[in-house]
Image (tube, helix red, strand yellow):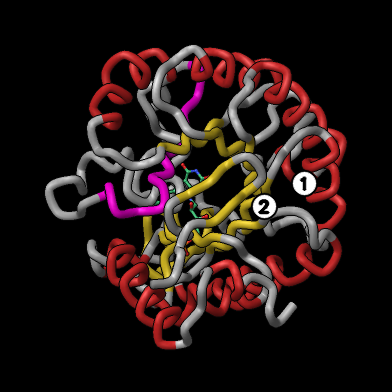
């Protein structure tokens, strides 16, 4: 039997397949359909300091081989999350990784601080794709300086293991990746959604109200694979989590071969709620058919 457990800095997960932030909400909506206890981890949607209603509709649009989304970080806010949602998540029996966001450095710090006082959180994933209202960057993660400030602030506010989730919208990911690790991130998650847009020729309107959104699904897999490979080449010691268009166990293997120690599954759940479970089962069967002692033998084999 292959040992499926993986190590990401201080974080040890029972297997390398987890959800991608936001794509299954808090996970509770799917709990009647999916046994999350089998997942490597459940990554909960981005939580902010105060409740957010999100963007006006329409905020999702189907595209060839993917979808555009502009949810606008809709969430209940950290206090309701800790009091009402977290106790229910704890009963699922899976490691919980909470994604955090903010519009200011102080907001990230405050959310991290409040979550560290709560029971049952395994790690924090810092969503650097939030708009930076203090300095006007479309995303914090487009600036090395702002990335450093956010990660340092969060690092000082929590003893929990920290994952920095990087944006693909800034060109070469390596300078931002280095800034995040130097500031205290123990692992990196690549990638958040590349920006895109959709227009309806019939109505002559944008298909998203915003009108810019994040593209996800199979359409972005080659971009995500490249980002993981690129960062692995430059920073072979840093554990990486690959995300973007993963729909099959073969996709998961490909991400591991170019350097991901673990993977996240997002949009695939909209086509198939059992996607994560099937990817995990396929990965296990693949590793056993190749008589791997440890799944980690795949990590970076092609990098
Ligand atoms: C509807 C939706 C909501 C999302 N919400 C979040 C979020 O709250 N925080 C975050 O970091 N990423 C969020 N993402 C991005 C995903 O976590 C993931 O990085 C991206 O969708 C690429 O993976 P995929 O192609 O497997 O979906 C969201 C994506 C979608 C489609």
- Residue occupying the point 41% across, 37% down: 96
From the viewer's perspective, is residue 28 above or below residue 75? Answer: below
Kindly indicate whether the residue at mark 1 contacts the one at mark 2 (C-beta within 8 angstroms): yes
Q: Position of residue 35 (x, y in %)?
A: 21, 52
Quarter of the view holding residue 279:
bottom left
- Residue occupying the point 54% across, 60% down: 262
Which residue lies most toward the left here?
A: 32
* Magenta stretch contains residue 86: no
Relative side of 253 to 134, left or right: left
From the viewer's perspective, is residue 277 above or below residue 214? Answer: below
Q: Judging from the image, what secondary structure is the residue with disc 1 in?
A: helix
The residue wearing badge 2 is 167
- Closer to the camera, 281 or 34? 281
From the viewer's perspective, is residue 219 above or below residue 238? Answer: below
The residue wearing badge 1 is 142
Looking at the rendering, the stretch of residues picked out in magenta corresponds to: 36-49
Q: Residues within 10 Å of mark 2 (few under 14, many from 20)?
A: many
Q: Do we see residue 201 in this rendering?
A: no
- Residue occupying the point 58% across, 67% down: 296
Q: Position of residue 183 (x, y in %)?
A: 81, 33
Q: Do we see residue 30 in this rendering?
A: yes
| Viewport quadrant of the N terminus | bottom left
| Viewport quadrant of the C terminus | bottom right
Quarter of the view holding residue 182:
top right
- Residue occupying the point 14% across, 54% down: 33
- Closer to the camera, 161 or 3? 3
């Amino acid at each position: 039997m292959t040992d499926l457990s993986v190590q990401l800095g201080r974080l040890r997960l029972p297997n390398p397949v987890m959800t991608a932030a936001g794509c299954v909400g808090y996970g509770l909506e799917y709990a009647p359909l999916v046994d999350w206890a089998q997942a490597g981890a459940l990554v909960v949607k981005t939580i902010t300091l105060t409740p957010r209603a999100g963007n006006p509709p329409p905020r999702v649009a189907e595209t060839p081989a993917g979808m555009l989304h502009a949810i606008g970080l809709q969430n209940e806010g950290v206090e309701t999350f800790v009091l009402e949602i977290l106790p229910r998540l704890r009963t699922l029996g899976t490691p919980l990784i909470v994604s955090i966001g903010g519009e200011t450095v102080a907001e990230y710090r405050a959310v991290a601080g409040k979550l560290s006082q709560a029971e049952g959180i395994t790690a924090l994933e810092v969503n650097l794709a939030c708009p930076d209202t203090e300095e006007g960057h479309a995303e914090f993660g487009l600036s090395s300086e702002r990335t450093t400030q956010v990660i340092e602030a969060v690092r000082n506010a929590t003893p929990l293991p920290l994952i920095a989730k990087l944006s693909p919208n800034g060109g070469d990911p390596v300078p931002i990746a280095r800034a995040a690790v130097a500031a205290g991130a123990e692992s990196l998650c690549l990638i958040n959604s590349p920006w895109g847009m959709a227009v309806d020729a019939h109505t002559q309107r944008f298909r998203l109200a915003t009108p810019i959104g994040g593209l996800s699904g199979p359409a972005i897999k080659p971009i995500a694979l490249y980002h993981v490979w690129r960062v692995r080449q430059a920073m072979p010691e840093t554990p990486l989590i690959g995300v973007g268009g993963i729909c099959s166990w073969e996709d998961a293997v490909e991400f591991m071969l170019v350097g991901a120690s673990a993977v996240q599954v997002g949009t695939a759940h909209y086509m198939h709620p059992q996607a994560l479970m099937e990817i995990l089962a396929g990965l296990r069967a693949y590793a056993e058919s190749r008589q791997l002692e440890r799944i980690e033998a795949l990590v970076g084999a092609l990098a």
